[in-house]
Amino acid sequence: MNQDRAPIRVALLGCGTVGTEVLRLLHDQPDEFAARTGAPMLVTGVAVRRPHKHPEVPEHLLTTDAQALVEGDVDVVVELIGGIEPARSLLLTALRSGKSVVTANKALLAEHGSELYAAADASGADIYFEAAVAGAIPLLRPLRESLAGDRINRVMGIVNGTTNFILSAMDSTGAGYAETLDEAGRLGYAEADPTADVDGFDAAAKAAILASLAFHTRVTASDVHREGISAVTPGDIAAARTLDRTVKLLAICERVVDEDGTESVSARVHPAMIPRSHPLAGVGDAFNAVFVEAEAAGQLMFYGQGAGGAPTASAVLGDLVAVARNLVVAGKGPRESAHAQLPVRPMGKTPTRYHISLDVADKAGVLSQVAAMFNEHDVSISVVRQQGRGEEASLVVVTHTAPDAALRSTVDKIAQLPVVREVVSVMRVEGEPS
Ligand code: NDP
Ligand code: HSE
């Protein structure tokens, strides 16, 4: 241990699922941290709401006054409270006074990232946030640093563990969404209020962070097209299965280049069918995985635990060591890189592919009526499969790539055809050549 260097003073805001593990790991290996950073690490206080609920924290460290803790004698503020306020104000206070920040708060970064980066830039403080996307998986640092010399074209991944658990269970058991959500709650995956996960808010915040880093462009949560999984039916899962596909909630961030060379960024979160042979198809339970396509590096896959106290604490502590090292050598970490400032493409103009499964009347002319709707909207068909069942037939159409709005309108028109008895399943298709 470097006994000469003054300790790095750390304020911990929040001591819940993640904060508890951060504190435990820091406490368990003080010499290791000192050796890795070049200075001892000293926790100066732990801010919580209900101190009596925290027998694991030495009493002299506990406080309910997070603001005073941030304003006191500290070098680094680790924010593990979550949500927008008071986290935003606390971090702005820290950064404006030159104190570096480590946070796992994706909701805050996706809404107010630019304000926080600007405050860090102005004072020269660092802001690190590896744990905000995909928990333990080293992903943001590879995007921010290792791939900084490459050109990233696509980032596609499973970034929400709760929804992946639910969709994986629906796929393996054939059970419905509501039943599987209950099971996820019983097993401790889904929270008491699962809205942020199942409606895609959590994944959309992560997609905004990923798109911002990958494309050097400011993308906020409101720029991300968002659909959750509550409308996914056993019929969708069965339809996917018949074509050797499975359904995943994907965050997809891509660079779209028009014919005239104009570039834009598309960021979206929605359920999609992917081939069972795709690397993301095998990602089960509550695991996360992210697939990155870069021009020189080619395809890269990042896989691991995207949530949980200890896994997330690993990413937080990696950031804390990086910040501490910077403080020891009076260096600085990477700053925000938003120089490209590409326009964000609306979902309606984003190229996608659809899988449409219909129950139709089994009589002459049905296929041509359905095909006419695709033709009317300039949507090209890739696969058609029809199977007669007496009076009715099941018809499956997979399209080539077309603007999402054209595909949506085609489905709306098809649903109104008298020969169409039921639209069984409509889902976007990803992970295969268009
Ligand atoms: P928890 O809800 O478990 O813990 C939140 C902590 O913040 C609690 O200790 C709570 O105090 C404290 N707190 C809340 N409000 C205040 C306040 N006003 N002042 C001081 N302390 C306050 O959250 P998690 O540990 O699960 O999550 C923390 C962050 O990490 C979030 O941003 C989350 O999105 C992110 N994250 C979490 C993951 C996970 O698996 N849990 C994975 C990846 C990221 P008290 O205990 O007294 O109520
Ligand atoms: N609720 C999130 C999930 C936690 O299920 O993935 C990690 O951000």
Image: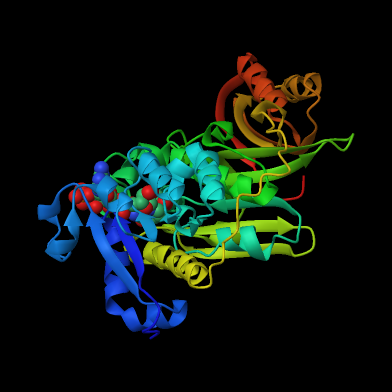
Apparent side of residue 169 relative to residue 360 in the rendered image (left or right): left
Q: Quadrant of residue 25?
A: bottom left
Apparent side of residue 257 relative to residue 123 in the rendered image (left or right): right
Relative to 68, say whether 10 is above or below: below
Residue 243 shows in the view = no
Apparent side of residue 198 relative to residue 247 in the rendered image (left or right): left
- Front in this rendered view, residue 320 or 370: 320
Relative to 433, say whether 328 is above or below: below
Residue at the (45%, 46%) spot, across then down = 96
Q: Position of residue 251 (x, y in %)?
A: 57, 45
Relative to 374, say whether 337 is above or below: below
Residue at the (68%, 29%) spot, across then down = 404
Q: Position of residue 132 (x, y in %)?
A: 46, 53
Q: Position of residue 418 (x, y in %)?
A: 63, 13
User: In the picture, which quadrant includes the C terminus?
Assistant: top right
User: In the picture, which quadrant includes the N terminus?
Assistant: bottom left
Q: Which residue reaches farthest right? A: 260
Q: Position of residue 175 (x, y in %)?
A: 38, 45
Q: In this figure, which colouring scheme has been used for the structure?
A: rainbow
- Front in this rendered view, residue 266 or 334: 334
Q: Quadrant of residue 271?
A: top right
Relative to 420, say whether 53 is above or below: below
Q: Which residue reaches farthest left? A: 52
Apparent side of residue 300 relative to residue 296 in the rendered image (left or right): left
Residue at the (36%, 84%) spot, across then down = 3
Residue 327 shows in the view = yes
